[in-house]
């Protein structure tokens, strides 16, 4: 099997992501566009509840599988359109399926992993080698690197499939709860005001989940500080 043939699925995914991103489809899911067409969206969702949810899952699966930036726009739109519970359930399915596709394509492209890893993978290798389960869960729970980049890195590190799927579903779902809550909060704030601006983000339904995501982002710094102090406390006196 040639190297290019092995890389073909991953290359096709990347090309599909470029086409999707360049098409401007994600622009139709921005908060301003959703507000402008809110009545039409709600009518469509009421008329075809299952079809619209399946379409949402398919779009998110494609976006995650291709690794394009902007998946957060789709997730926020899901919270806006379906509410926190439905959007979280649908987003969890799409996120897990998309991650699985990208993971399998990356594993197929990388082969046995004998080639020199990228710098990102090299930085992650030490922690993964020592504690594979906790490190994989950490990467999925804490937004320390982009979701797609972490997926490709875990594929190169040959993370076991069961561990990858479990961590992706669990960690992704926890983050999705906050992200869909932001989308639902924006929808609630916009229903009370015709003006779209930064004051929307001061709405309680938006501010609280934003604060939770900010705490998740700061978690690596806190863990590093606690670990450093513990190492200094356990260091024998000279």
Image (cartoon, rainbow, N blue to C red):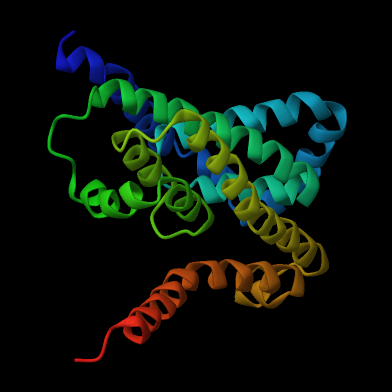
101, 51: nearer the viewer: 101
Q: Is residue 63 visible?
A: no
Q: Residue at x 33, y 18 (%)?
A: 9
Residue lying furthest top: 1
The quadrant of the picture occupied by the C terminus is: bottom left
The quadrant of the picture occupied by the N terminus is: top left
Give the side of residue 88 with respect to residue 12, left or right: right
Give the side of residue 35 with respect to residue 100, left or right: right
> How many numbered markers are drawn?
0
- Which picture quadrant has residue 86? top right
Examine the rendered structure and indicate whether residue 158 appears above or below residue 145. Answer: above
Residue 93 x %, y %: 64, 33
Q: Residue at x 60, y 55 (%)?
A: 175
Examine the rendered structure and indicate whether residue 17 appears above or below residue 215. Answer: above
185, 3: nearer the viewer: 3
Residue lying furthest bottom: 238
Q: Is residue 157 visible?
A: yes
Residue 2 x %, y %: 15, 11
């Amino acid at each position: 099997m040639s190297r290019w043939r092995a890389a073909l699925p991953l290359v096709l995914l990347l090309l599909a992501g470029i086409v999707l991103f360049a098409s401007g489809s994600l622009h139709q899911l921005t908060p301003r566009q959703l507000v402008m067409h809110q009545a039409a969206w709600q009518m469509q969702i009421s008329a075809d509840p299952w079809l619209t949810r399946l379409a949402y899952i398919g779009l998110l699966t494609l976006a995650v599988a291709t690794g394009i930036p902007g998946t957060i726009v789709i997730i926020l739109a899901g919270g806006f359109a379906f509410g926190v519970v439905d959007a979280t359930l649908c987003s969890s399915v799409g996120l897990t399926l998309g991650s699985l596709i990208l993971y399998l394509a990356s594993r197929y492209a990388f082969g046995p992993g004998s080639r020199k890893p990228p710098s990102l993978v090299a930085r992650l290798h030490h922690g993964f080698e020592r504690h594979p389960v906790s490190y994989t869960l950490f990467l999925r729970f804490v937004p320390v690197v982009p979701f797609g980049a972490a997926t490709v890195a875990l594929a190169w590190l040959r993370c076991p499939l069961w561990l990858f799927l479990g961590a992706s579903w669990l960690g992704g779902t926890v983050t999705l709860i906050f992200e869909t809550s932001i989308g639902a909060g924006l929808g609630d704030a916009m229903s009370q005001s015709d003006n779209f601006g930064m004051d929307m983000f001061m709405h309680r339904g938006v501010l609280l989940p934003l604060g939770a995501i900010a705490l998740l982002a700061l978690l690596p710094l806190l863990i590093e500080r606690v670990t450093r102090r513990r190492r200094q406390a356990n260091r024998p006196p000279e």
